[in-house]
Amino acid sequence: MSTALEELERHLQETLGRSVIGLRPVIRALTIAIVARGHVLLQGPPGLGKTLLSKSLAAALGGTFNRVQGTADLMPSDIIGVHVYDAARREFEFRPGPLFADILLVDEVNRASPKTQSALLEAMEERQVSVERKTYPLPPQFMVIATQNPGEFEGTYPLPESQLDRFMLRVELSYPAREDERSILSQYAAVSAPLSASAAPSVSSAALIAARDCVDQVHMAPELLAYVLDLAQASRQHSHLTLGLSTRGALAVLRAARIAAALRGADFVSPDDVKEVLPVVISHRLVLAPEAMLEGVSTQLIVQRLLELVPVPR
């Protein structure tokens, strides 16, 4: 008998799979983020369906959806909102920006200036924004899905470490397999074919609550907790890194591992669950030392080395 969490993933795989093809591992990662109330950074070359995937996810969840296009002249007020003077009431009134949505898609976030990127920090961590000494809460299911082009592309700004740490997952999108790409071309080849999210029943609030309840019942042994702490400590002491895994990042690993265990129908977390989620949870949080970049070392390679070096509990 499948659990509420497994039913949630099945629904998302089926619904999103009608619009985006060949992205089952990516949809699983998005399911983990939804259940954990985390934010997601989608990275890959342009034209691979990052925006379509985000729109399809918002439609599947049935929440309010807003989109912001990252540009060099985008200002923080364009995202958060502004105060406008109401002549009739003789006072300033706050007009919320697109940030006030259940799902916010920030397309090409690394084309926005660092000042505008930083406008998301408070919202992503505390689910609120402060404007003119007043605090405005965001919707309870608030989630940021940001798409990012590779850093070597023209006109991009690297995201600050503090903001990268607020993304629970970074998911890499690569070019699809040949058969998947053939299906994509066949489905959208017609001039009249709409490149949009497929209509389907949305996920109810009760279904999300039930899925999260399933995760809360998954047992995390003290040995697994110590394993995650050992991985975090090893990253902080690694000679090729100037910044290792933060406490926020270690907590994200634990949450993601519990969800991964629940998705396979288990009632306890195993080391394999930690190994499964570790690359997408911590790769973007690690900062390479200059000599490591010169040697061509990547954070993905360091994650694999950490898994090889840190003893696995029995």
Image (spheres, rainbow, N blue to C red):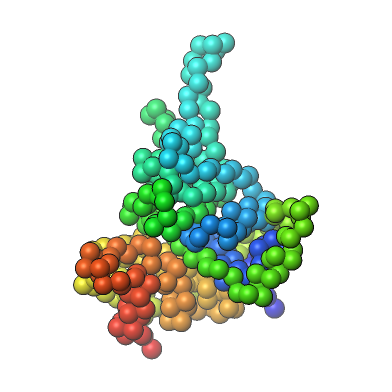
For image coordinates 31% across by 82% down, the residue present is 310
Q: Is residue 96 visible?
A: yes
Q: Is residue 204 left or right of residue 169?
A: right
Q: Nearer the viewer, residue 270 or 249?
A: 249
Image quadrant where residue 204 sits: bottom right
Quadrant of the image occupied by residue 248: bottom left
| Figure quadrant of the N terminus | bottom right
271 displayed left or right of 188: left
**Image quarter of the C terminus:** bottom left
Residue at x 22% of width, y 64% of height: 290
User: How far from the left and from the top, in percent, is residue 158?
Assistant: 36, 52
Left or right: residue 155 versus residue 96 is left
Q: Nearer the viewer, residue 136 or 292?
A: 292
Q: In the depicted view, which residue is nearer to us: 52 or 162?
A: 52
Task: Report if residue 213 is visible in the image.
Answer: no
Q: Position of residue 152 (x, y in %)?
A: 39, 57
Q: Nearer the viewer, residue 292 or 210?
A: 292
Please give the name of the residue rendered at 73% of the width and 56% of the height, measured from the top-left corner: 198
